[in-house]
Amino acid sequence: MTSASITVRVPAKVNLQLAVGPLAADGFHPLSTVFQAVSLYDEVTATPLPPGAGVRISVRGEDVSEVPADGRNLAARAAQALAERLGVTADVALQISKGIPVAGGMAGGSADAAAALVACAAVWRPDAGRDLLVEVAAGLGSDVPFPLIGGTAIGTGRGDRLMPVLASGRFRWIFATAHQGLSTPTVFARFDALAHERGTAVPQPGVDERVIAALRSGDAAALGAALSNDLQQAAISLRPELQSVLDAGLSAGALGAIVSGSGPTCAFLVPDDEVAMAVTLTLSPTGLCRTLRSAQGPVAGARILAR
Ligand code: C5P
């Protein structure tokens, strides 16, 4: 056990493909997804506390009023779960610094949990392997394992069973955040309701080989054309203005536009600086976006920052 603070930087994710199957008896949907880690980051600092102090959470950054700063925070639950798994007591202060949009469909809360696992493991048991962290992560939420590995990966099961994908080069993104977040269970419930209204069976999800081929060859135009998200229609039916945001970005020259995960953040794949600027300048005056951020992917997963 170390007595010094450990800071971990962790990336956001975007789903390049999100195929959603029929609601299963466990209340979850089988997924087939392709994650990419992108260069929007949160930082989590773990500082050991005296025995009996428990887990303390503090959060800073934009929109932190929406983030619980207590035991409900997924990072606090991550620290507790890891402590139980390692047989230590969870006495630690976790300071979370948000750079990932809150409730934006970019797995910010899951990223914080992943970062808390890496930071707390470094404090309590520096020799704990990544496999152990991935196992604890999967018990916390479907999106928690991915930020541990980062890069680009296929996720199956609930999205938590990961297989890295080789991607050539870097892809450039603009992310448009919305004024208000969307709840993941609400979007999945709308997906179910829309499927029910259609009256057709939801097929089992599968990986889109066009996405994998575009990643391997580093072909941004092909990737833009292949982006897909089965939750997009549900997110748009809850927030119709998202369709205008997507259309505006495409009209400005984006290679592809997609709602990120369960939304409401919209992701635009762009070929160069010029189009990145055009997308930003087109979306900015619409008043539909809270922030417009430029990022690139893939980037590495959760990493300890040098002290
Ligand atoms: O696993 P996680 O806590 O991120 O999931 C949040 C909610 O999203 C679940 O309670 C469920 O309603 C929905 N979900 C789902 N199918 C998945 C992942 C999440 O229905 N594969």
Image (cartoon, rainbow, N blue to C red):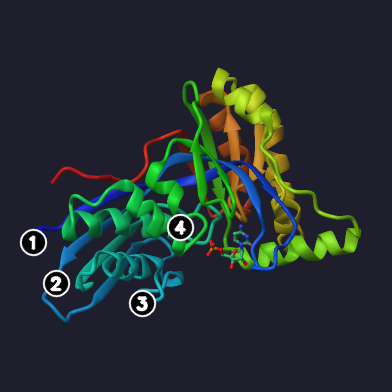
- Residue 236: name its quadrant: bottom right
From what the image shows, is residue 195 above or below residue 252?
below
Pinpoint residue 178: horizontal percent, then vertical percent.
58, 56
Q: CA distance from mark 3 to mark 2?
A: 16 Å
Q: Which residue matches tag 3? A: 71
* Residue found farthest to the right: 199
At numbered mark 2, what does the secondary structure look like: helix, strand or loop?
A: loop
Which comes before the other along the chain, label 1 or label 4?
1
Instruction: Choose mark 1 or mark 4, whichever is in front.
Output: 4
Q: CA distance from mark 4 to mark 2?
A: 26 Å
Asked if the residue at label 1 sits under 8 Å from ligand 1, the reply is no
Q: Residues within 10 Å of mark 3 (few under 14, many from 20)?
A: some
Q: Nearer the viewer, residue 244 or 77?
A: 77
Pinpoint residue 8: horizontal percent, then vertical percent.
26, 50
Whether pointer 1 and pointer 3 mark residues with C-beta atoms closer than 8 Å, the reply is no
Q: Which residue matches tag 1? A: 3
Q: Whereabouts is ligand 1, in terms of quadrant?
A: bottom right
Q: CA distance from mark 1 to mark 3?
A: 22 Å
Residue at (42% x, 69% y) in the render: 67
Q: Which residue matches tag 2? A: 49
Instruction: Choose mark 4 or mark 3, whichever is in front.
Output: 4
Whether pointer 4 and pointer 2 mark residues with C-beta atoms closer than 8 Å, the reply is no
Whether pointer 4 and pointer 3 mark residues with C-beta atoms closer than 8 Å, the reply is no
Pinpoint residue 17: horizontal percent, then vertical percent.
64, 40
Asked if the residue at label 3 sits under 8 Å from ligand 1, the reply is no
Q: Which residue matches tag 4? A: 138
* Residue found farthest to the left: 3
Q: At label 1, which amino acid type do we have?
A: Ser
Q: Is residue 85 left or right of residue 50?
A: right
Q: Nearer the viewer, residue 106 or 172?
A: 106
Q: Residues within 10 Å of mark 1 (few under 14, many from 20)?
A: few
